[in-house]
């Protein structure tokens, strides 16, 4: 089952999730399925919000009777639906990045996306250690994604005995960031980290280029999405971000996914949720075959033992004790309106069962 937004501003994330999972399922079924079982994909619209996410999860569980759920792409929706999914004992592949998701202690959770702490550490290490900048400002959305990101960035700074010179916030859907950017300018920031979804991040970037011409810009993982690049235009050039997927990366796994996706859907996958959903299905397959069973608890237990499974993005999955599966990230820079990988960061401090 797919739990994701299929309406509203985040609908492209839902479509990407569905397409990635569908591509994997079609390939698996063509090869005979998993242990002789053919896979079926169903999806429900969470609208990316708490209450609709619970309703959508109920439909997936009680109406469609799914064995596993991929999603939601929004952490707020994941946290709202998680208690019901845990109660019913279903494997959950969350695509939200909030730290709270893997702090729940839910043994059914296997997050196939980077977590905010890793993203925050990567960004701050690059700003401080690589560029030598010390005056860092944060501008974030007030949803779970933005708040969680801001908190982890602030903690990463604190670990270096530093603190942000300014922390500003805005509501999802806002289009004017003039007041926040002027406050950041007054604080003397050398670097601005924008932590938001693609549309707001792109508009923020365009306005920051006008109001903060000498400030180096950094962004969340949505900076690598085609939707961000289209809206931000030339203003995106030079921005540095952290991502799980880059369609331009010269890696056999990425090239294969891009080729297969283009053949199936007629376009190159630019949204990273394509890769993550594709990998979630294949991780389920690897675990079920290792368990020799599709029984839910057996697959769950086998999932916890998976190590060194290469993903379609070129990164490697290792399932940690808390259910985090991805502990690596690419650092990108926008060059000529394209996301180019300039480095890779690996979290070495992972606790396994």
Image (cartoon, rainbow, N blue to C red):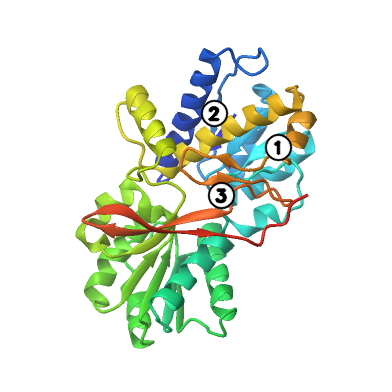
In this rendering, the label closer to the viewer, 1 or 2: 1
Q: Position of residue 201 (x, y in %)?
A: 36, 60
Which element is circle 2 on?
Answer: strand
The residue closer to the viewer here, 165 or 48, is 165
Earlier residue among tags 1 and 2: 2
The residue closer to the viewer here, 81 or 156, is 156
Badges 1 and 3: C-beta atoms under 8 Å apart?
no
- Left or right? Give the position of 220 relative to 75: left
Q: CA distance from mark 2 to mark 3?
A: 17 Å
Q: Position of residue 13 (x, y in %)?
A: 44, 41
Q: CA distance from mark 1 to mark 2?
A: 23 Å
The residue closer to the viewer here, 15 or 152, is 152
Q: Position of residue 275 (x, y in %)?
A: 47, 38
Residue at 50% x, 62% y is: 146
Q: Which residue is mark 1?
A: 303
In this rendering, the label closer to the viewer, 2 or 3: 3
Residue at 54% x, 35% y is: 279
Mark 2: give few (<14), some (14-19) or many (20+) Cα within 10 Å.
many
Q: Which mark is residue 96?
A: 3
- Left or right? Give the position of 35 relative to 229: right
Q: Position of residue 49 (x, y in %)?
A: 55, 47
Mark 1: give few (<14), some (14-19) or many (20+) Cα within 10 Å.
many
Residue at 79% x, 31% y is: 297
Q: Which residue is mark 2?
A: 43
Q: Is residue 169 visible?
A: no
Residue at 43% x, 34% y is: 15
Q: CA distance from mark 1 to mark 3?
A: 19 Å
Q: Which mark is residue 313?
A: none
In this rendering, the label closer to the viewer, 1 or 3: 1
């Amino acid at each position: 089952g797919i739990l994701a937004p299929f309406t509203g501003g985040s609908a492209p994330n839902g479509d990407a999730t569905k397409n990635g999972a569908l591509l994997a399922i079609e390939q698996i079924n063509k090869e005979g399925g998993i242990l002789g079982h053919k896979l079926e994909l169903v999806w429900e619209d969470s609208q990316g919000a708490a209450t609709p996410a619970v309703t959508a999860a109920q439909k997936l569980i009680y109406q469609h009777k799914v064995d596993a759920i991929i999603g939601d792409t929004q952490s707020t929706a994941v946290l709202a639906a998680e208690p019901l999914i845990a109660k019913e004992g279903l494997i959950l592949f969350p695509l939200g990045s909030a730290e709270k998701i893997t702090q729940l202690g839910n043994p059914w959770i296997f997050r196939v996306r980077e977590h905010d702490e890793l993203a925050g550490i990567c960004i701050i290490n690059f700003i401080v250690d690589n560029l030598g900048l010390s005056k860092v400002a944060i501008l974030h959305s007030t949803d779970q994604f933005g708040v969680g990101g801001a908190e982890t960035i602030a903690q990463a700074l604190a670990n270096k005995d530093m603190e942000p010179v300014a922390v500003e916030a805005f509501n999802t859907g806002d289009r004017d960031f003039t007041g926040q950017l002027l406050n950041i300018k007054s604080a003397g920031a050398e670097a601005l980290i924008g932590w938001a979804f693609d549309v707001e991040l792109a508009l923020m970037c365009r306005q920051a280029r006008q109001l903060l011409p000498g400030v180096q810009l950094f962004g969340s993982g949505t900076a690598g999405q085609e939707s961000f690049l289209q809206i931000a235009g030339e203003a995106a050039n030079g921005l540095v971000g952290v991502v799980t997927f880059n369609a331009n990366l010269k890696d056999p796994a990425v090239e294969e996914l891009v080729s297969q996706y283009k053949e199936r859907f007629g376009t190159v996958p630019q949204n990273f949720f394509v890769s993550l959903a594709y990998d979630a299905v294949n991780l389920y397959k690897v675990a079920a075959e290792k368990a020799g069973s599709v029984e839910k608890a057996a697959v769950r237990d086998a999932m916890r033992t998976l190590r060194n499974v290469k993903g379609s993005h070129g990164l490697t999955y290792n399932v940690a004790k808390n259910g985090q599966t991805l502990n690596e990230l690419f650092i990108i820079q926008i060059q000529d309106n394209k996301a180019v990988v300039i480095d890779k960061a690996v979290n070495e401090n992972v606790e396994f069962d």
